[in-house]
Amino acid sequence: MRKRHYLGANICFVEVNLKSLRKVTVKKRLPHDPSALDQLTAPAMQFAEQSHLGHYGRGLNAPYLPVMQVQHERMTLVARAGGERMTIDRNLQFWNAGNEAATSPKMVVVETKSAFGRGIADTILRSNGYHRVGSCSKYCIGLAALGIVPRFNKFLPAFRRLLPHVTSTQTAENPAFLAA
């Protein structure tokens, strides 16, 4: 579960990402009060529980606990036809109670979404020497950058590209590690 706050429009959602049998992500959203962004409210928890129950036939396996906050600036470009889109994220910042990490303002993360990765943006990026990193999640990159997870093998190619552009400050004496 995550909360997504769009600063420009001052709207906020609780989002639950679920996986189908074919590993396709199914997102469910619930409007959320922006002033309660740092709280796991009863309606948010009930929404997450009901989403899991409806999708998987069972409720949550464990309680939700805050792990990390992520902030970034995003630009989204959408093609007029064909359903292709591209997001460009910059100024990524990750923090929790004991750690902070941020990317260089000059670094951007570009994500394209198109049928079979053969859209116009994919073609232009490849022709300019930019190649797909593979699986990459800002959430998992943030966990690795903050030192919350000891291993990040699945995201190592993306993290190696980001690492020279990330500054990190560890303020906790013993940061907690989640099971990998």
Image (cartoon, rainbow, N blue to C red):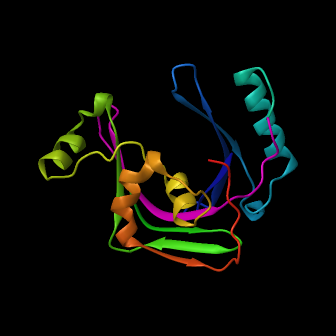
Where is 146 relative to 115, above or below?
A: below
Give the residue displayed 74% in from the left and 58% down from the top: 66
- How far from the left and from the top, in percent, is residue 161? 33, 60
Is residue 165 in the magenta section?
Answer: no
In the foreground, 62 or 127: 62
Q: Would you say residue 76 is visible in this rendering?
A: no
In the foreground, 170 or 60: 170
In the foreground, 153 or 2: 153
In the foreground, 45 or 143: 143
Where is 5 relative to 29, above or below?
A: below
- How far from the left and from the top, in percent, is residue 16? 66, 39
Q: Quadrant of the N terminus?
A: top right
Magenta residues, as a range?
61-87
Is residue 71 in the magenta section?
Answer: yes
What residue occupies the far left of the structure in this picture? 127
- How far from the left and from the top, in percent, is residue 68? 65, 61
Which of the 4 quarters of the picture holds residue 94?
bottom right
Residue 42 placement, left or right of 157: right
- How far from the left and from the top, in percent, is residue 55? 70, 23
